[in-house]
Image (spheres, helix red, strand yellow):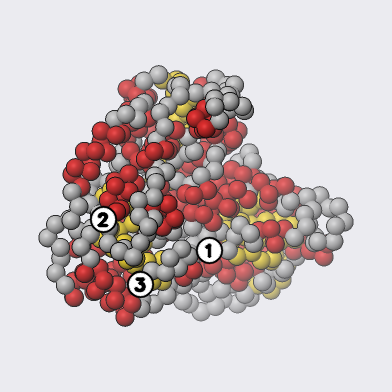
């Protein structure tokens, strides 16, 4: 985010907590997800004194606060903030920070600390932890300590700039409980943090354009780094008549209704014929490490992370910077240097027919996902989970717009979904939001039903209850001679649990029932849970983990 420059105001006497809240507001961040605690009491008081300009959303577990900030960031593309006490509170947030790192989400964690002079002295303070900021550096791209009120605004701005710039990711600031309340003369910045956007290398863009024009069978592969370059990706695809492959984080970069949109199984079938890949905002891990490469395929990479270019194989051309900037420059160079392709070189119609037949065997996942899609408006947001329905959704669910399919990416951490979806809904109050989960994963954050009820968060959770860790059980049955251990579950009656928390609950047994109940719940825009009793489901993994076909 950027703000117009203006004259710096005169120094103001305030403490570090007040300066931190003021700087968040300067950056357009008006919500803090948090669980209260002694070390951060001054921060909460500063939020209170900010009045209706600032909202503090409290949850029942620190894990959920970080996931809520993550969901808000993933669904908006804008920085979001959470706070936690040190030690156990900080450690409870690290799974979400790791997922923010993996999904390139600009999340700011504000961590309390023991008195500054005692940090790392092993005195035995409440929640004392050795080298908290060093630990944070392993799951965040920026980790620093606020040591005074005067330093707070600059550090908040620096943390947010780091979170947004280059390959986005989480940042962490810690502050001693004594520093939070120590006043000083604070010079507030004239503007909020700025996202740094490297200039476009036009010579490299022209080389890429010539390479693309010479290709016979190009393919575009997009990841989460392309979510804000939807128009540019579509322009490139249509000029080159190149299919656009997306999976998980890249879903919605172009609508799955677009005639050039393809998914993983189709991409794998086309892979042996591809002679050029334009990889935009994706690690390209699956294609380079699993499907295989050879000398007959050239790669153009557009990525905000300079280190991504030759992580596996050096590309023919590396364009480092913003996907939209470089996508637009490449599209303009193509138009200047050549003529648009007349037709796609691949027979996508026959591939789609093959895929439809293959997916027809993936029941009941297909029918349930089709029911969800019919009930969920086009602008609605779907939050994926590590469950059988979630895995299948990455292949089946139509996605029409960027940031309406929220996935944990390569971390694929069980139980992330409900807290993340609460943050999605809070950041997008006017959009319907559905979160799917299995009974195993939903139990990770079941207590946050209380958070949904307390804050009136109109999220609808659909819990597929088969009384097992389904993926674990299948692997044990298939790979370990049927020796099943620690995979069967005794889960509660989720409808009764939801109602006990003050959340509307109901149970369904068919896709048709789910469609009706889901449509009603979304229309009510109130917290709701729908339990789907189900059994074992067929595996989608032969369409996800596919063998090497090149190199």
**What residue is drawn where x is 62% and y is 75%?**
187
Q: Is residue 178 left or right of residue 339?
A: right
The residue carrying mark 3 is: 317
Q: Is residue 50 visible?
A: no
Q: Disc 2 marks which residue?
A: 273
Determine contact: label 2, label 1, CB under 8 Å: no
> Vertically, is 147 above or below 498?
below
In-front residue for pair 112/365: 365
The answer to whether 460 appears left or right of 65 in the picture is: left
Graded by Cα atoms within 10 Å as few (under 14), some (14 to 19) or many (20 or more), the crowding at tag 2 reads: some
Q: Nearer the viewer, residue 188 or 242?
A: 242
Residue 103 against residue 373 in the figure, above or below: below
Q: Which mark is residue 43?
A: none
Can you tell which quarter of the image residue 451 is in?
top right
Element type at marker 1?
helix
Quarter occupied by the N terminus: bottom left
Instruction: Examine the rendered structure and indicate whether residue 85 appears above or below residue 143.
Output: above
- Residue 49 picture location, percent across and down: 63, 55
- Tell me the residue at 71%/56% (across/down): 112
Crowd around label 3: few <14 · some 14–19 · many ≥20 (10 Å): many
Instruction: Give the alpha-carbon distance from disc 2 to disc 1, as whole Å.
Output: 38 Å
Quadrant of the image occupied by residue 358: top left
Crowd tier of the residue under label 1, counting other residues whose Cα lies within 10 Å: few below 14, some 14–19, many 20 or above: many
Residue with the mark numbered 1: 163
Q: Are marks 3 and 2 in contact (CB under 8 Å)?
A: no
> Is residue 346 in view from this perspective?
yes
3 vs 2, front mark? 2
């Amino acid at each position: 985010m950027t703000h117009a420059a203006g004259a710096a105001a005169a120094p103001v006497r305030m403490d570090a907590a007040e300066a931190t809240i003021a700087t968040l507001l300067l950056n357009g961040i008006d919500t803090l997800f948090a669980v209260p605690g002694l070390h951060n009491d001054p921060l909460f008081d500063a939020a209170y004194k900010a009045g209706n300009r600032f909202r503090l959303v409290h949850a029942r577990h620190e894990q959920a606060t970080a996931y809520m900030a993550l969901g808000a960031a993933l669904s908006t593309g804008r920085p979001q903030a959470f706070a936690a006490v040190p030690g156990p509170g900080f450690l409870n947030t690290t799974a979400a920070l790791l997922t923010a790192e993996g999904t390139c989400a600009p999340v700011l964690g504000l961590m309390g600390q023991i008195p500054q002079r005692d940090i790392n002295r092993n005195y035995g303070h409440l929640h004392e932890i050795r080298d908290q900021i060093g630990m944070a550096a392993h799951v965040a791209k920026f980790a620093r300590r606020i040591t005074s009120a005067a330093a707070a605004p600059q550090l908040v701005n620096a943390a947010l700039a780091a979170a947004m710039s280059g390959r986005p990711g989480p940042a962490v600031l810690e502050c001693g409980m004594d520093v939070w309340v120590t006043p000083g003369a604070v010079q507030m910045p004239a503007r909020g943090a700025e996202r740094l956007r490297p200039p476009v290398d036009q010579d490299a863009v022209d080389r890429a354009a010539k390479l693309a024009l010479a290709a016979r069978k190009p393919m575009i592969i997009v990841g989460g780094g392309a979510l804000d370059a939807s128009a540019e990706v579509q322009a490139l695809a249509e000029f080159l008549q190149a299919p656009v492959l997306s999976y998980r984080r890249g879903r919605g970069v172009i609508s799955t209704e677009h005639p050039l949109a393809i998914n993983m199984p189709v991409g794998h079938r086309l892979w042996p014929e591809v002679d050029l890949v334009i990889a935009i905002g994706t690690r390209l891990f699956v294609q380079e490490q699993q499907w295989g490469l050879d000398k007959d395929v050239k790669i153009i990479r557009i990525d905000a992370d300079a280190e991504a270019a030759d992580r596996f194989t050096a590309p023919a051309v590396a364009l480092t910077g913003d996907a939209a900037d470089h996508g637009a420059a490449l599209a303009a160079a193509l138009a200047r240097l050549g003529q648009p392709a007349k037709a796609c070189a691949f027979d996508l119609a026959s591939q789609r027919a093959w895929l439809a037949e293959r997916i027809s065997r993936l029941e009941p996942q297909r029918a349930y996902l089709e029911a969800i899609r019919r009930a969920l408006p086009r602008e609605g947001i779907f939050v994926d989970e590590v469950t059988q329905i979630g895995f299948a959704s990455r292949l089946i669910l139509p996605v029409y717009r960027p940031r309406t399919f929220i996935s944990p990416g390569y971390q694929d951490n069980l139980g992330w979904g409900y807290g993340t979806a609460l943050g999605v809904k809070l950041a997008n109050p006017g959009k319907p939001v559905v979160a799917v989960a299995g009974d195993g994963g939903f139990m990770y954050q079941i207590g946050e039903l209380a958070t949904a009820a307390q804050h009136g968060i109109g999220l609808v959770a659909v819990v597929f209850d088969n009384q097992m860790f389904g993926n674990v059980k299948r692997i044990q049955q298939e790979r370990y001679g049927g020796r099943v251990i620690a995979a069967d579950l005794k889960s509660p009656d989720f409808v009764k649990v939801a109602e006990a928390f003050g959340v509307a609950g109901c149970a369904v047994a068919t896709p048709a029932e789910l469609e009706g109940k889901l449509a009603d719940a979304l229309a009510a825009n109130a917290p709701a849970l729908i339990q789907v009793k189900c059994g074992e489901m067929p595996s989608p993994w032969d369409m996800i983990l596919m063998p090497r076909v090149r190199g």
